[in-house]
Image (cartoon, helix red, strand yellow):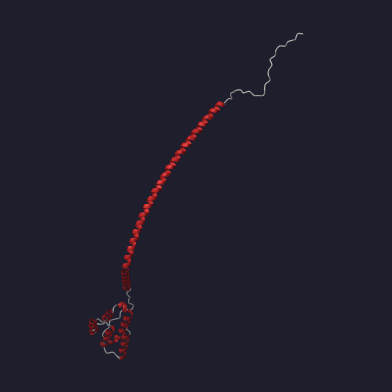
């Protein structure tokens, strides 16, 4: 028996489940890789600039810090020198003040004497400036008549008692009375003035008593009144 032959067929082996690696090209990947490289370079440049700036800044800060420390040292030295100078000057002033205080203590008694003298002079000046003013009018002149003696004597005694300080010293009061006599009466009591000049005693009562004695004869009432007036001084 003749066996029938069949034409040979290509038998395809079945595909296994293991994937095969194939090389393929993705569009745009090369462009992205190039941009990433540029970005990395830019970042590196920026980082380098930052580091350089930080180094320069730190160097400047360090230099400024050193300069400040140096300045502080100079200031401290200057302040120390100033304190020394000021202290020396203060000590000198204290010594001068102590010396002046000793001198003042030595001169204090003299100051007290001068102050007392000034106080006395001030009181004297005050008394001189406060001169009393007369309050009564001047009496008339005494004429050669007994009828005018008692009224004139009354006015003169009142003037001497009230305005005696305004008239002045005892000598001034003495010649005040003498000035208000008539020429004849002045000549009659001239001896009283001479005695007062020789003794230096200006007794107004003695002058008035002499005026009463040389007057024309007085009656008892007039003479008693005249004596009463003398006792009022």
Q: Residue at x 49, y 35 (%)?
A: 47
Nearest the eye: 141 or 164: 164
Q: Where's residue 195, x and y in %?
A: 23, 83
* Res 73 visible: yes
Q: Where's residue 63, x and y in %?
A: 42, 42
Q: Residue at x 33, y 67 (%)?
A: 105
Q: Residue at x 43, y 42 (%)?
A: 62
| Horizontal relation, residue 32 to residue 161: left or right | right
* Res 184 visible: no
Q: Where's residue 222, x and y in %?
A: 31, 89
Nearest the eye: 31 or 153: 31
Considering only vertical position in the picture, is 124 above or below 23?
below
Nearest the eye: 184 or 66: 66
Considering only vertical position in the picture, is 224 above or below 140?
below
Quadrant of the frame with the N terminus: top right
Quadrant of the frame with the C terminus: bottom left
């Amino acid at each position: 028996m003749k066996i029938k032959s069949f034409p040979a067929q290509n038998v395809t082996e079945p595909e296994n489940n293991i994937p095969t690696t194939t090389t393929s090209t993705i569009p745009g990947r090369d462009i992205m890789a190039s941009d990433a490289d540029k970005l990395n370079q830019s970042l590196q440049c920026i980082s380098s600039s930052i580091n350089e700036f930080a180094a320069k800044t730190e160097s400047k800060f360090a230099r400024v810090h050193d300069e400040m420390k140096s300045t502080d040292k100079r200031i401290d030295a200057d302040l120390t020198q100033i304190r020394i100078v000021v202290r020396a000057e203060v000590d000198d002033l204290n010594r001068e003040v102590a010396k002046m205080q000793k001198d003042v203590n030595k001169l204090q008694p003299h100051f007290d004497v001068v102050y007392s003298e000034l106080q006395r002079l001030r009181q004297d000046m005050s008394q001189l400036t406060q001169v009393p003013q007369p309050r009564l009018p001047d009496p008339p002149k005494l004429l050669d008549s007994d009828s005018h003696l008692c009224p004139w004597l009354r006015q003169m005694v009142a003037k001497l008692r009230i305005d005696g300080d305004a008239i002045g010293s005892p000598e001034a009061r003495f010649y005040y009375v003498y000035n208000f006599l008539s020429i004849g009466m002045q000549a009659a009591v001239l001896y009283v003035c001479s005695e007062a000049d020789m003794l230096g005693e200006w007794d107004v009562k003695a002058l008035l008593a002499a005026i009463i004695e040389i007057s024309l004869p007085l009656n008892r009432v007039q003479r008693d009144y005249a004596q009463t007036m003398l006792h009022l001084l």
